[in-house]
Structure formats: C-alpha cells, structure tokens
Amino acid sequence: MTTVLDGKQTANDLMIALKQTVDELKTKGVTPGLAVILVGEDPASAIYVRNKHRRADGLGIRSLQISMPKTTTETELLNKIEELNEDPTIDGILVQLPLPADIDEQKVIEAIDPNKDVDGFHPMNVGKLWTNMPQVVASTPYGIMTLLDHYHIDVTGMNAVIVGRSNIVGRPMAALLLNHSATVTIAHSKTKDLAKVCAQADLLVVATGRAEMITADMVKPGAIVIDVGMDRNAEGKLVGDVNYAQVAPIASAITPVPGGVGPMTIASLMLQTVELAKRRVHADA
Ligand SMILES: Nc1nc2c(c(=O)[nH]1)N[C@@H](CN(C=O)c1ccc(C(=O)N[C@@H](CCC(=O)O)C(=O)O)cc1)CN2
Ligand SMILES: [Mg+2]
C-alpha cells in the first residue's frame, strides 16, 4: 500500500496548533507581523501571495501585502525593504520570486535584514543552514521535512537523491537532509544517467519544473517520492515533475500535486514567522 503524503491536511492540522501559539503571543502583547512584497503582475505569484495573506489572516498574523507595479525600480524596492527592516512591528519580510528581469534578485535578497528574512534566502541564513545551525530555512524544504516528520519518516541513513539545484529548493533541501543524517546526492540537468542515479534513492525529491519527467523506471520500488513540481501537461492540467500514475503504485509514499508540497510551503512560512515573532517576547521581557 502506498501512503499518500497529504500536505493539505497536514498543513491544516499544523495551523490549528499554531493559531493557539499566536493567541498566546498576543496575550504577551506581540502580534506576529509578516510583510509580503509582490512586484509586477505574474498571475501565479499573485495567487501564492493571496494564499499567504489568507493563511496569515486565519491565524491572526498581521499580514502586510505590498503590491508594487512592474515598472518599480530596484532602488524603489530596496527603499521599501529598508523601511520594513526598520519597522518593529514586522517580524518577517518576503519578496515574492521571480522578480522582473531588470531587478537584481540577489541584491534584493541581501537587502533584507537576515533576522527578518523569513524565506531563509539571505546568505547569512544559507550559511547557518549549511553549518547545521539553522535560523530560518527556505519554506519549501522546511515544509517537506515537516511533512516527513508528520508521517514519522526518519531519513537517517537514507540514500536521498534531489533532482534540481535551485537556491529555493534543491540546495537547502540537500543541507536539511544532510543535517538529518541522510546520504545526499544532488542531481541536475547535466547529471549523467539520471535514471540510474534516481533509481538508487530511498528518498527522491524532485524539483525540476519539467512535467512528469520522473517515470517508473527511475524509481526504486518502495522509495519515498516527494514532488515539488507544479507544471501544466499537454492538456493544460496541473501536474508535478513525477508521473504520478506510473510512480505511485511502486512507491511506499508519495506527495500528490496539488495538495502535497505546496500547502506545506505556506504552512512553513507561517510557522517561521511566528518563530521570529517569539524573539520579540524575549527581547521585550
Ligand atoms: N519568495 C518566495 N518566492 C517563491 C517561493 C518562496 O518560497 N518564496 N516559492 C514558490 C511559490 N510559492 C510560494 O511562494 C508557492 C507555490 C505553490 C504553492 C501551492 O500551494 N500550490 C498548490 C497548487 C496551486 C495551484 O493550483 O496552482 C499545491 O501544490 O497544492 C504554495 C506556494 C516560488 N516563489
Ligand atoms: Mg531576475
């Protein structure tokens, strides 16, 4: 029997407990504050930002949604970040990616106060993660670890293969799995004999952005398969990077798309915003 790792349900369960924590923080005079900046009109980004706002709202987190036009200059964006860095009511700052092409993404990420960098993308937080002293961790890999934990899956000693080397998913995923004592391989578009590498995996995490590219022959029977992809297939249907129909029957556990990793990404953002806000209680005490 294959276990479907239900990210939607898990996220809902976690948010019930988190609401209590937020309520407790409020009795101590701290309302967690999250600022989400969206530059331009990318329709998918607009949906994700709206979903983040809804989740925050439901928890009682103060969520500041800042929409800036696609004509925004890099300087204007940096000034806005500076303003939020200085705002004591804001615990977490996030700039929705991707940014318009004429804005330097790395420069923007590095402008965020590392202590408010709720996405964990700032080099200081990346460094802390890779030295196994994580402060804030990228939401998608953090959500995947939380989902595995929720299903009592211990990755210690597992052969973990990650397909994809992005700063948002692949790299931080590798660091987290290594910190949890998995044996980690990062595969990517230049990897030789990808099918053979994937077929060695006890845990396969796929984040390539290529619709249904992981087929049954690339998966070891009994493997745990985590699909980070959100792609459209030829019929325009939302699918993952894994061919679910082929792979689900041979996997021991698998995430669906939608309803797997995506909801956990947003849940992680909420969990870490509240963690950042908790430090305000200690600072004020
Ligand atoms: N600053 C950031 N930008 C981006 C991040 C990020 O973590 N920080 N990640 C992605 C987008 N993303 C969150 O921002 C995100 C994407 C998708 C989902 C989600 O819940 N997906 C649903 C399906 C949605 C659909 O129907 O289209 C699911 O998987 O069930 C949540 C968050 C890039 N940018
Ligand atoms: Mg860019």
Image: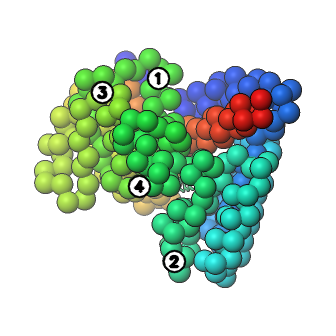
Percent coordinates x, y for residue 120 in the rendering: 52, 48
| Residue at the image position 68 percent from the left and 76 percent from the top | 76
The numbered mark at residue 101 is 2
Percent coordinates x, y for residue 16 in the rendering: 72, 25
Residue 11 in which image quadrant: top right
Percent coordinates x, y for residue 35 in the rendering: 72, 54
Three-letter code for the amino acid on which mark 2 is drawn: Ala
Three-letter code for the amino acid on which mark 1 is drawn: Asp
| Residue at the image position 26 percent from the left and 54 percent from the top | 188
Pair 3/2: label in front: 3
Tag 3: Cα neighbours inside 10 Å, few (<14), some, or many (≥20)?
some
What is the spatial separation of the Cα atoms under label 3 and label 2, in whole angstroms?
38 Å
Q: Is residue 182 visible?
A: yes
Tag 2: Cα neighbours inside 10 Å, few (<14), some, or many (≥20)?
few
Q: Does the residue labelled 2 lie within 8 Å of ligand 2?
A: yes
Quickly name the residue at label 3: 181
The numbered mark at residue 167 is 4
Residue 181 in which image quadrant: top left
Residue 197 in which image quadrant: top left
Describe the element under mark 4 as helix, strand or loop.
loop
Describe the element under mark 1 as helix, strand or loop.
helix
| Residue at the image position 30 percent from the left and 43 percent from the top | 162
